[in-house]
Image (tube, rainbow, N blue to C red):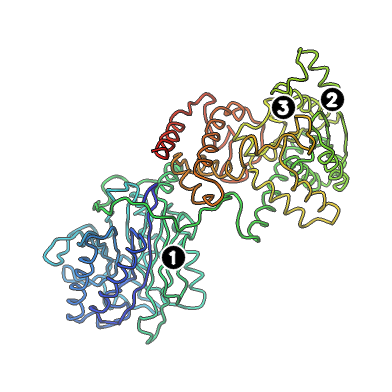
Amino acid sequence: MKYGFVRVAAYAPELRVADCDFNASAAVDAIGEAAGRGVTLLVLPELCITGYTCGDLFLQQPLLRAAERSLLRVASATRGQKMAVVIGVPLRHCGKLYNCAAVLCGGRVLGVVPKTHIPNYGEFYELRHFSPAPDGLSDIELGGARVPFGTDLLFCSRDLPDFRLAVEICEDLWVPCPPSARHAAAGATVIANCSASDEAIGKTDYRRSLIPGQSARCVCGYVYASAGPDESTTDLVFSGHHLIAENGAVLAEAAPFSGSMAVSEIDVQRLTFERRRMNTFDAAPAGTHREIFFETGLYDVPLTRAVPRLPFVPSDDGARAERCEAILNLQARGLKKRLMHSHAKTAVIGISGGLDSCLALLVAVRAIDLLALPRRDVVAVTMPCFGTTARTRSNAEELCRQLGVSLRCIDISDSVHQHFRDIGHNENDHSVTYENAQARQRTLVLMDIANQTGGLVVGTGDLSELALGWATYNGDHMSMYGVNAGVPKTLVRHIVASVAAQSDDALRRVLLDILDTPVSPELLPPGGDGIAQKTEDLVGPYELHDFFLYYIVRWGFSPAKVLYLAQAAFGGDYSRKTLLYWLRSFYRRFFAQQFKRSCLPDGPRIGSVTLSPRGDWRMPSDACADLWLKELDALEQEDLS
């Protein structure tokens, strides 16, 4: 697939224990079904050519000969398919019998990986039949051909260099040091596991934690296919529980006994980016693994994995409420420490009646509560001027009353008029000078009130505004501690809504009205219908900019890939042309406004994306955006042609 996505599947075909011909036919059918779904990698269960539950029949020559014949038959079915297949099979080698996974592609067996850890406890007695994987690499003869044999095989795609596949088998994952860790260090981005994990109470949940956990430790994709209910039930029951995980997240699951195929796309570009970013991800020395190359071709199929429109906001109501509470607590704890350390007597906040200052005030109140100080030590200052509307001013004042904080109202109109006279600015010229003079005057007032009260100015600007540079330099851009600096706009809204849901009726009403008010700096005189400036009309929808921010900064994706994902997430609401327009706007603003981020006040890190120049994001203020913009130019030319 394009843009680093590899469509993978895990499945347990229909099975008859010890009937290799039947099982081979079922595997061939599974390959056909997977091919019809655009799958590039199909993983089938442990020993599924014979069945895992053959017992002492594994020592019978007819079964082993039939297994080898059936393996070659399944391999031939991959000819002409754009797919690699991993399938479990017992194979003889150098006088011993091994529990193996064979990797098939292009009509042949690319390599054979024997199981390393052979369980012989509880319900398992595999050592009765199988030997542990031998050390080193060798060749095994299959159908007259010499095939690589060993645990340290790396199957490398010629079409997508970031797609590098390694294999482990069932118990290999359950031991303290799984082989997959070694494979990942050698460069494997996808681990396939052919498994036969029987069902027992609690085991399903354990798999759901074990498999994504290993994918996180190895920063890899993990495709786990387990034996299905057609295995013998003499003593055990198998369920066909399949899981696909990527770097800690479950992408797809076939629930126990569902009989379904788990299908999703693993983003190998994302994985290789994360490994480059993590300097603690130790790469193995070159030459530890034998590389085997294969070809499946590059082709485009629609994504089946979810691409959330709001990547910073959990979709589940419970998880979202928990996230909002955790963030509010982090913000308040950070401010509490700063107030204590600076011996501040007050927390001074400019209150506009808008969303960001509302959140900052809620944070300050919680910090003061944690310090067991009276809420009047929070000094809220509302500073009406030319663009202030009755609605926002009323909400600001009511919010302060409900929270029990000190409130000061300072009309800055006269001082701004005087400033215009001082610099010779025509007040009918509503340019950026007209707007920014108000923002800087407000900051001057806040700073001086903080000096007057022995306090500290709490900043209100959020992460999305910092990304876009939507702040007046040395105006709302500046504070003594920026509590919202790590919180994107789409999440600010949900945190305030979460507080509203837990508040009494009076506070809830004002919070809900603030949430319902259009985002605006209110720096231009209001029109007949109220607020004259609506931020999203000027800089674009925040849901798009937060989406762009997440994939550009957190994952380093190219403009083309960000656009591709945006189409998957927003295609029903925004045209490709509109997405391109706002993506271009984001890149231009992001590069041009870095100088504002290079001198940000302190503020708490909240999530995986932060733009603090002292932390996760260090970018020169005069970096050139041409490479990124030219890629967008090329995409637009493609659309025109």
Residue drawn at 51 percent across, 70 percent down = 205
Kind of residue indicated by mark 3: Gly
What residue type is disc 1 on?
Answer: Leu
Determine whether 21 is above or below 283 in the image. below
Q: Does residue 631 sit above or below 299 in this rendering?
A: above
Report how many numbered discs are placed on residues in the image. Answer: 3
**Residue that appears at 82% across and 19% down:** 417
Residue 113, given in percent of the width and then of the height, sits at 27, 63
Q: Which mark is residue 413?
A: 2
Residue 595 percent location from the top left of the image: 59, 26
Of the numbered discs in the image, which one, if any, rests on residue 92? none
**Where does label 3 land, which residue?**
475
Q: Are marks 3 and 2 in contact (CB under 8 Å)?
A: no
**Label 1 element class:** strand
Residue receiving disc 1: 243
In the figure, 11 relative to 372: above or below? below
Lower position in the chain sequence, tag 3 or tag 1: 1
